[in-house]
Image (cartoon, rainbow, N blue to C red):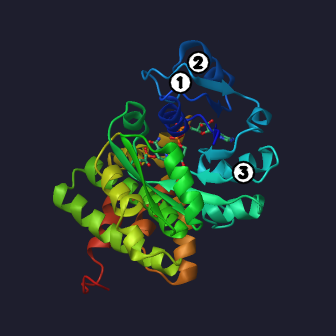
Amino acid sequence: MKIGIVGAGAWGTALAQTIAAEGAQTLIWAREADVVDSITTSHENRLFLPGIPLSPTLRATQNLAELTHCHAFLVVTPAQHLRAVLSALPAGGQPLVLCAKGIEEGTGLLMHEVARAVRPGSPVAVLSGPTFAHEVARGLPTAITLAAEDRDLGERLIARIARPHFRPYYTDDVAGAEVGGAVKNVLAIACGVVEGRGLGQNARAALISRGFAEMTRFGLAKGARAETLAGLSGLGDLVLTCSSTASRNFSLGKGLGEGRSAADLLADRRTVAEGAFTAPVLKAAAARLGVDMPIVSAVCALLAGEASVDTVVGDLLSRPLRSEGD
Ligand SMILES: NC(=O)C1=CN([C@@H]2O[C@H](COP(=O)(O)OP(=O)(O)OC[C@H]3O[C@@H](n4cnc5c(N)ncnc54)[C@H](O)[C@@H]3O)[C@@H](O)[C@H]2O)C=CC1
Ligand SMILES: O=C(CO)COP(=O)(O)O
């Protein structure tokens, strides 16, 4: 199965490197000419994954039509660009493995729902978990969830992309895998705020736990299974991104906690902090479903500049005391 990678940010490059490292010719589509040039001539993605040598068997192109002969696509563009990129992919019913973590602005759709709308003839899978790109690209041990309703497709994809250091685990719970990845980005912003404002490790642990309760409530309302939310793509990724400034979402939150504005922190950046886009869409989706997500709402207020850090923290701390399971 020849796999084409669509999107050459940090994550697309790390996945391409994982596949190409064992000698398979691998083709990656990059939007930027300088990224194509950098991968082709220096075997490095200097813009999005600097300092990590890439396999010479990895070839980059700026022309999506060159991917026509691939048998499956790993689609690794940011969530808000998925629809446009899928529309521009060459026609064909190849399976799509969706790797973005987010919810679409305007529609509130999960990524697999966008893919089904744009390419109804293509089977869909989701790849999501605790996977910092720079670690995967260096060959450090990583486990990840691969979700597909069609078990046979899921197992064929897993057989194709698994490596000794890169272990996909199968589930048929596509919505569950996507909800975890989308929601944890917003919660990572909140944990970054705790770090930036110096609120302590207890507060961070409380946010992870109560954030996970929000993720679970929302996920169950979207038809996800609790076991998926407690797995690699949910709790696993939540713990990773809530613990490290290697996370762009956590770093964004840290800046907010230090008193900088979201507009300032997001201006001119080339890398994506998905939680900033997902937060307001998630808040609206939760309201439609009648799901209470106070931490997500607090992140929205901070991102919109509607309230100070101290105000949103005070509001969270003054909520009525309640049972843990509610
Ligand atoms: N970096 C990581 O460690 C991981 C990232 N992801 C997810 O992968 C997705 C891609 O993130 P990264 O590779 O980290 O991106 P990145 O932040 O490294 O690079 C930005 C990407 O956005 C693309 N882009 C910018 N404007 C665009 C447009 N108009 N149309 C299409 N593409 C455009 C760029 O070409 C580039 O590929 C995100 O949803 C992210 O949450 C998932 C797992 C790990
Ligand atoms: O999703 C990720 C790791 O699993 C990357 O997190 P950030 O997008 O916050 O950097």
Q: CA distance from mark 2 to mark 3?
A: 28 Å
Which residue is rendered at x = 72% and y = 53% of the image?
83
Residue corresponding to mark 2: 38
Question: As rendered, which of 50 and 59 lies closer to the eye?
Answer: 59
Tell me which corner region of the image, top left, top right, bottom left or bottom right, holds residue 6: top right
Question: As rendered, which of 100 and 154 lies closer to the eye?
Answer: 154
Q: Secondary structure under badge 2?
A: helix
Residue furthest top as drawn:
41
**Numbered disc in front, either 2 or 3:** 3
1 and 2 marks in contact (CB < 8 Å): yes
Q: Which mark is residue 94?
A: 3
Q: Residue 69: percent from the left, percent from the top? A: 75, 38
The answer to whether residue 294 is visible is no
Q: Secondary structure under badge 3?
A: loop
Residue corresponding to mark 1: 45
Q: Secondary structure under badge 1?
A: loop
Q: Amino acid at mark 1?
A: Asn
Question: As rendered, which of 31 and 116 lies closer to the eye?
Answer: 116
